[in-house]
Image (cartoon, rainbow, N blue to C red):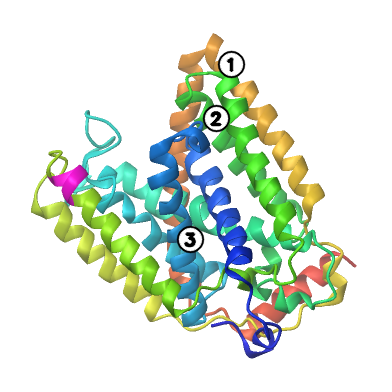
């Protein structure tokens, strides 16, 4: 549930049609960063499997875990990262990638207690928490900030996310690195197909823009517009149970993709461990007023357009390089993969340490640091 000072804003709930625009928008953002940046999906908006399975999977997972965070009042970036770790565990039951790897050759660097080491570190500790979950929510708020409104910022975005939505050099550095990695992964997994990269990115960004143009016309366009009521939660739970069951038994068990009982047991233990880490953490402070002096330094659509252009140019550049020098680019690909695996361990460690420190005092100190940086 959101803080009391945000609840008062929603005296009239958004219509179902309006809310579906928000849901589709966050789903497209998750598809962009999770599937396109990894090169796993291509022209997904023309593919039946992607439209019926992959897209709903990401949209529902983002909505489910974000609503869980709202209800538990654990919506800080640290908390969302930990929820994203739980999100990433779907790669066990649904795709079985954590158990048998990306291909028939098996896990990249072996297994530990039945879990692929390389796959687990990259997907569960980095890719899904950050690209599938956190980044779509942050960009969703960036789009919100691009709309003029008399509604106070605290009722439109999450105050604890302000440090990640500022135009700071460190934020720019991190996001551009992510875009470089995503562009390189696309080029390698698309086998240097320049037209395919252009079509996939162009089509996805067009969908995001059209949904954003529609969303900005609504009064309720805020991060809290992603909130799902009780009936919606039940529908999502039923959908997820059905999806996990069908993919585990239909795709996994009958497809011979379940390597035994050990990986299943380890996966269950990991769910319990990660769930305990989230549950045992203290709530986040989201009722701190956002200083007006910081508002003019927040990111907006102009900044996002630069990222879009950078993404397209970089993906095209890497694609051209792949056509001429595939082996060196594959080495770069493996270097990036190793890097995010190591960085993922560090981020998880930091998140576990910081999960109980997302207090009002901590957030105010972050605001003061940002104010000093801009004065």
Q: From the viewer's perspective, is the residue at label 2 or at label 3 nearer? A: 3
Q: Which element is circle 2 on?
A: helix
Residue depicted at x 60% and y 83%: 285
Sequence-wise, the earlier of marks 2 and 3 is 3
**Region rendered in magenta:** 249-253
Between 298 and 14, the residue placed more toward the observer is 14
Residue 252 belongs to magenta span: yes
Give the residue at mark 3. Answer: 62
Q: Position of residue 196 (x, y in %)?
A: 55, 23
Q: Position of residue 268 (x, y in %)?
A: 21, 64
Res 165 seen here: no
Res 48 seen here: yes
For residue 321, the mark is 1
Residue 12, by quadrant, is bottom right
Q: Residues within 10 Å of mark 3 (few under 14, many from 20)?
A: many
Residue depicted at x 70% and y 47%: 210
Q: Which element is circle 1 on?
A: helix
Give the residue at mark 2. Answer: 184
User: In the image, is residue 311 above or below residue 4?
Assistant: above
Alpha carbons under labels 2 and 1: distance apart: 10 Å
Q: Residues within 10 Å of mark 1 (few under 14, many from 20)?
A: some
Residue depicted at x 46% and y 22%: 330
Residue 134, by quadrant, is bottom right
């Amino acid at each position: 549930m959101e803080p009391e000072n945000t609840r008062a804003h929603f005296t009239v709930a958004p219509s179902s049609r309006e809310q579906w625009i928000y849901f589709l928008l966050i789903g497209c953002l998750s598809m962009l960063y999770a599937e396109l940046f990894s090169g796993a999906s291509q022209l997904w908006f023309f593919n039946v499997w992607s439209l019926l399975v992959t897209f709903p999977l990401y949209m529902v997972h983002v909505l489910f875990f974000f609503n869980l965070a709202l209800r538990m009042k654990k919506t800080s970036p640290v908390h969302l990262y930990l929820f994203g770790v739980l999100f990433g565990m779907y790669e066990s039951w649904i795709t079985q990638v954590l158990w048998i790897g990306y291909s028939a050759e098996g896990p990249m660097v072996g297994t530990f207690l039945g879990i692929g080491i390389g796959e687990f570190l990259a997907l569960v500790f980095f890719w899904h928490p950050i690209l599938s979950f956190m980044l779509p929510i942050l960009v969703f708020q960036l789009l919100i900030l691009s709309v003029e409104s008399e509604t106070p910022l605290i009722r439109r975005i999450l105050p604890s996310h302000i440090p990640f939505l500022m135009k700071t050099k460190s934020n720019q550095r991190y996001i551009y690195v992510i875009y470089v990695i995503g562009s390189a992964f696309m080029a390698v997994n698309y086998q240097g197909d320049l037209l395919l990269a252009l079509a996939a990115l162009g089509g996805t960004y067009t969908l995001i823009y059209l949904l954003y143009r529609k969303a900005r016309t609504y009064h309720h366009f805020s991060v809290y517009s992603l909130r799902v009521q009780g009936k919606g939660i039940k529908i999502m739970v039923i959908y997820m149970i059905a999806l996990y069951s069908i993919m585990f038994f239909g795709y996994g068990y009958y497809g011979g993709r379940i390597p035994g009982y050990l990986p299943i047991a380890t996966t269950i233990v990991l769910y319990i461990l990660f769930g305990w880490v989230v549950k045992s953490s203290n709530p986040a402070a989201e009722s701190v007023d956002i200083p007006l002096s910081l508002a003019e330094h927040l990111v907006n659509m102009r900044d996002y357009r630069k990222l879009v252009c950078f993404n397209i140019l970089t993906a095209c550049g890497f694609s051209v390089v792949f056509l001429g020098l595939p082996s060196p680019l594959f080495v770069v690909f493996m270097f990036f993969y190793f890097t995010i695996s190591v960085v993922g361990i560090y981020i998880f460690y930091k998140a576990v340490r910081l999960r109980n420190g997302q207090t009002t005092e901590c957030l105010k100190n972050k605001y003061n640091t940002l104010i000093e940086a801009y004065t």
